[in-house]
Amino acid sequence: MTGPLHRFRALPLRSRLALLVAVAVAVAVAAVAVACWFVTRAQLEEQRDATLRGTTVDNTYLSNLYQYCTRTSELPPSPYTGLTVQLIDAQGTACTAPDSPELPVTAADLAVVGSKRPGPLHTETDADGAKMRVFTYPVTVTASRGGPTQPRIDLGVSIARPLSEIDEPLSTLAWVLLIVSGIGVVGAGAAGLWVARSGLRPVDELTEAVEHVARTEDLTVRIPVEGEDEIARLSRSFNSMTASLATSRDRQAQLIADAGHELRTPLTSLRTNVELLARSDETGRAIPPDDRRALMTSVKAQMTELASLIGDLQELARPDAAQPGPLQVVALHDITRTALRRARLRGPELTITAELAPWYVRAEPAALERAVVNVLDNAVKFSPPGSTIDVVLHRGRLTVRDHGPGIPADELPHVFERFWRSPSARQLPGSGLGLSIVARTVQQSGGEIALSPAPGGGTEASITLPGAPTPPPDGVRG
């Protein structure tokens, strides 16, 4: 399709804006000019007609004109310059001054003779071909001069003015309006182009910034923001987007670096142990049974740690802003009981008490269970043998309180960061990702999590989740 609309859309935006402004101004100017011309013409015609109706010819001049027409006297010069005066008798005979062309006599003009009413205004063409505006009214003049009696004759008087009196000024006005309109349209086009360039300058800057980012992947580019208009909002949105992308890329790079660092330790230990076992087989020098069992135990532990770390990394590979899985109404107390059974298996030497009041929440069941398990695993990991872990669920607040060494106050702000581990916990198994996963799961469910020092020593972890409006339906796993 190559029609006018398609060609218009193919133009640059600033050209389209300038063209639209010019067209809009042209239409407005044309409308104003046409309206001005018609209003002026109507006013002039009304004034001309009113002047004709209000004009009366002196009876003395009319008598002289009648006597001239009847060849009884000479006609003195007419005092009515620019006005055609014509007499009409009852037979329709017309007579004008010698320097005035004769006007045609219409039935309306003839009907005025002998009546007391003037005729209607009308337009006629005189003997010279000029358009004239004619008004006829009745009059009575003397037939001759001198004598004891002077008979009076009923006549009609047609007075006329040429239409050129207003046609020529109107024509001049039309040319003036046309020239002024043309200048206005050209000026509007230039102004529209200037406005388009000025208004689209921020868009050009934004385009250059986007092209620069696409070409160089430099996410530090920022666009200056001025004002509160749509362009300013667009600039702010772009700056916010590039800042978010830069943060996301930095976090990805940091995640890769941290993951590589965390993977290096178990891999190094695993490689060392495997090399020892391989060297024993190659040299034929047997490793003592106790040492071999220790090596195999270490290999299994490192493999378990690697598997746990990879699982945590797969969980974190889901972006923070991603939507969670389908939410269901689940029983938090049942999920906590399941997690407690696993925690007791991992810490058989610990005493774990539980007070669980029923509470239903909307969450992703598997993710919520993993979060509760991670919190309990942390409590088991840091609790000394023979100590107690207290678990309480009351009105949507799940607290896990251990009696371990606790967390220093300066380390509390970092506990939910990825790969962050307390210096005192670096010798213990773990990846430093568990609490980060817990925090994300709880936030996606609309809840809050916090760690704080417990009275008398240890740490208290609390998870608060909003309740669901109804218990889960039959068949939904709690």
Image: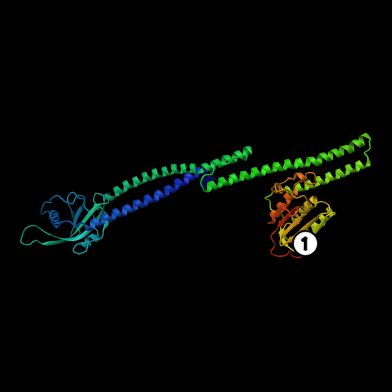
On the image, the x and y values in percent for residue 338 come to 80, 58
Quadrant of residue 103 within the rendered picture: bottom left
Numbered-mark total: 1
Compare residues 89 and 233 and report the one nearer the observer.
Answer: 233
Residue 115 vertical placement versus 348 (above, below): below
Q: In the figure, is residue 457 to the left or right of 106? A: right
Quadrant of residue 427 within the rendered picture: top right
Would residue 477 be seen by someone viewing this image from the given angle? no
Compare residues 309 and 129 and report the one nearer the observer.
Answer: 309
SS type, badge 1: strand
Q: In the figure, is residue 35 to the left or right of 477? A: left
Compare residues 19 and 109 and report the one nearer the observer.
Answer: 19
Q: Which residue is mark 1?
A: 355
On the image, the x and y values in percent for residue 11 come to 52, 43
Compare residues 423 and 93 and report the one nearer the observer.
Answer: 423
On the image, the x and y values in percent for residue 142 come to 12, 59
Q: Residue at x 87, y 39 (%)?
A: 274
Q: Residue at x 67, y 42 (%)?
A: 250
Q: Quadrant of the C terminus?
A: bottom right
Quadrant of residue 365 within the rendered picture: bottom right
In the orientation shown, which residue stands out farthest toward the front? 456
On the image, the x and y values in percent for residue 382 come to 79, 50
Kind of residue indicated by mark 1? Glu
Residue 122 vertical placement versus 16 (above, below): below
Q: In the figure, is residue 239 to the left or right of 172? A: right
In the orientation shown, which residue stands out farthest toward the top? 283
